[in-house]
Amino acid sequence: MIHPIPPGTRDVLPEEMQELRALQRSLIDLFEARGYGEVATPAIEYDEVLARGDGRAAASAYRFFDGSGDLLALRSDMTVPIARLVASRFADTEPPLRLSYLASAYRAVRPQRGQMREFVQAGVELIGEPAPGGTAEVIEVLEAALDVAGLDRAVIGLGDADLYRQLLTELGVEGEARESIIARLATHDLVGLEAELSQVGGISDEQAATCVALSQLRGGSEVLAQARGLGGAAVERATARLQETYEELERRGVAGRVQIDLGLLRDLGYYSGAILEVYDPALGHVLGGGGRYDGLMKRFGVDLPAAGFALYLERVHVAQMEEERRKGAGR
Amino acid sequence: MSSAVAGPSRAKADGPLKLAVPRGALYGETLDVLDGAGIDTSELRGDSRSLIFETEGLTLVTMRPSDVPTYVEAGAADVGITGKDVLLEQADRLVYELLDLGYGRCRMVLAGRVGDERMGESARRLGMIRIATKYPRIAERHFEATGRQIELIEVKGSVELAPLIGLGDGIVDLVATGRTLEENDLEVREEILECTARFVANRVAHKLRAAEVDDLTGRLREAVAG
C-alpha cells in the first residue's frame, strides 16, 4: 500500500544515503580541520526570534501554534539560528567564532516544479572577522569544500550586495521604482530593467545605460576596471570593496576560481557587502551561496561582523554524479 | 589550501553553446534573425525531421515555444528564444531575459462576440466574468490588476471556439493580425499587453559561459537592429 508524503519531501534509501553520508563526512571533516566546530540547533524556533533576523514576511514558510499558543516556525536557513545561538551562548566569548553545520532547512515550494520543501545545507559561519580577511577566509573554505566534493570545475561568483542600493540612492531613486528596479536586477530581466529605468524621472539615458551595463559585468579582476570606467561614487565604493577582497584572495592563492560578478544580487534581506554564489558547469542550478551579513548579529544584540556560506547538499550530490558521468564519457 | 585552481575561463564548456529555437509562429523570423547574426540555419529550413542541428560553434535545438523556459531554466539549453507571452505565463521559471528581439509582435487581448454584452451582464448579475483562455496566469493577473473577478476556464486548443458555443463570456488570447477573431465573429474589447520574441539565458550559463553568451547577445542585437 502506498502512503503519501508531502510534495517536496522525500525518503532516502541506503544506496543514495551511502553517497550522501560520504559527502557529508568529507565536508564536516574539512570544516572541523579548518577550525569550524559543528553545531546543531532546533529545526523549530519561535517565529518572533527568526523574524528578528530576517524581517521579510516570507522568512519562514511553515508557522504553527503549539499547545500553549506560542507561534513557532521551521527555519528557512541556518544563518539566522546561528546568529541567535551565538548571541545567547557565546556572548562572553572572545571573537572570532568559527562554526559549521549540516542541517535541514525548509522553504515554500511551487506545485509541480520539483522544488524541495525540505533540503540539507552544509555550511560555515565566521563571526567577528571583518572584510576583507573574513570574506577571503570563508571563500577559501568554500573552495576547499568544492575540492573535497570533487567539483574541480565549480566557480564561485563574488558580488556586492550594497552596490545597487547605493547606486540607486546616488541616483535619487526611491520608493516603488527602487523596489521594482531591484526586483528586475535580481531576476536579470534586462528588458524590463531598461523599460523601468526609462520611466523613472531624473535619470539620464546615460545613467540608465550604466546601470544595465554594470549588471552584465562578470569575469576576472579586469571587470573592476571596466566598472570604474562607468563612474559614480557607489560603483567606486563597491569596486574598492571587491578589489580588497580579491587582492586578499590572491594573497592566499585562491582567487583562481572566483568570478567577480557585478550583476549578482541575492534575495535574502540580511546581506551586506560581499555576496557569493556557487555554480558548476554540469548543473543549470546554483549549488549554494553566502556572503557577508555585518548587520545581522546586531539585531540579536551582539554587534559583530560576520560572513558564511551554505551549500545545498543534494544539489552538490547531483553535480558530483554529473561530473563523474562526464569524466566517464570523456575517456 | 585548495589544490587545482580553476579559473572561470577554465570552467570548460561542455561542447558548443545550446540555443533553444522555437518552432511554430516564431520559427521563420527566428531563422532569419539567426542568419542575420551569422548563424547558418540552412539545415533547419530543409524538411529534416531532426530536432537538433549542429552549426559552427552553436547547437540549435528546436522545440515548442512554451518548452523553451523549461529547457533553459534547467540548463539543458544554455540560451533560447521565445515569446514574451510564454515568459509571462511561466513567470516562475528562473531565466534571464537579456534582449527584446522585436519581431513576432502580437497583442494579448480580451475579446468577445461582436455586439454581444454578456461579459457586462455576467459581471453585473453574477459578480464575475467567465473567461476562456490558454493563458490563465496572464488573464488572472490582468483582471486582478483591474479589480474584477473572473471564473477561469483553461482550454488547450482553439480558444475562439469557446464563446461561440457558450463556454465562457469572453476570451483572453494572443492576436497577430486579428483575422482569426474576425472570422469567428469576435472583436477586441481590451488590450492587455504587447508581446515580442525575447532572448533568454540560463543563469549558470550566463555566468560560466559569459563570453559566448555576451557575443551571441551582441550579434542578435545587431541583427534585429539592422
Image (tube, rainbow, N blue to C red):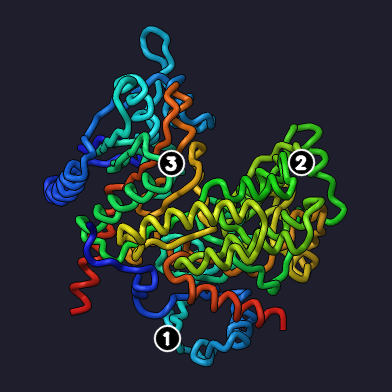
Label 2 packing within 10 angstroms: few (<14), some (14-19), many (20+) = few
Please state which of residues A124 and A1 is positioned toward the viewer in this rendering.
A124
Give the residue pinned by disc 3.
A109
Which label belongs to residue B54? 1
Circles 1 and 2: CB atoms closer than 8 Å? no
For the question of whether residue B136 can be seen, the reply is no
Residue at position x 50%, y 65% in the image? A218
User: Can residue A64 be seen by looking at this rendering?
Assistant: yes
Residue toward you, A304 or A330: A304
Q: CA distance from mark 3 to mark 1?
A: 37 Å
Per the rendering, the mark at residue A58 is none
For disc 2, the marked residue is B146
Question: What residue is at 48 percent from the left and 76 percent from the top?
Answer: B212
x%, y% of residue B48? 46, 88
Q: Residue at x 46, y 32 (%)?
A: A296
How far is disc 2 from disc 3 in space, using C-alphas?
28 Å
Q: Amino acid at mark 1?
A: Glu
Q: Mark 1: few, some, or many residues within 10 Å (few <14, many ≥20)?
A: some
Judge by depth and name the residue closer to the eye, A310 or A286: A310
What residue is rendered at 47% in x and 27% in y? A298
* Picture layout, residue A2 above or below residue B162: above
Residue B85 x/y as whole percent: 64, 60
Q: Do discs 1 and 2 belong to a common subunit?
A: yes
**Disc 1/disc 2 C-alpha distance (Å):** 47 Å
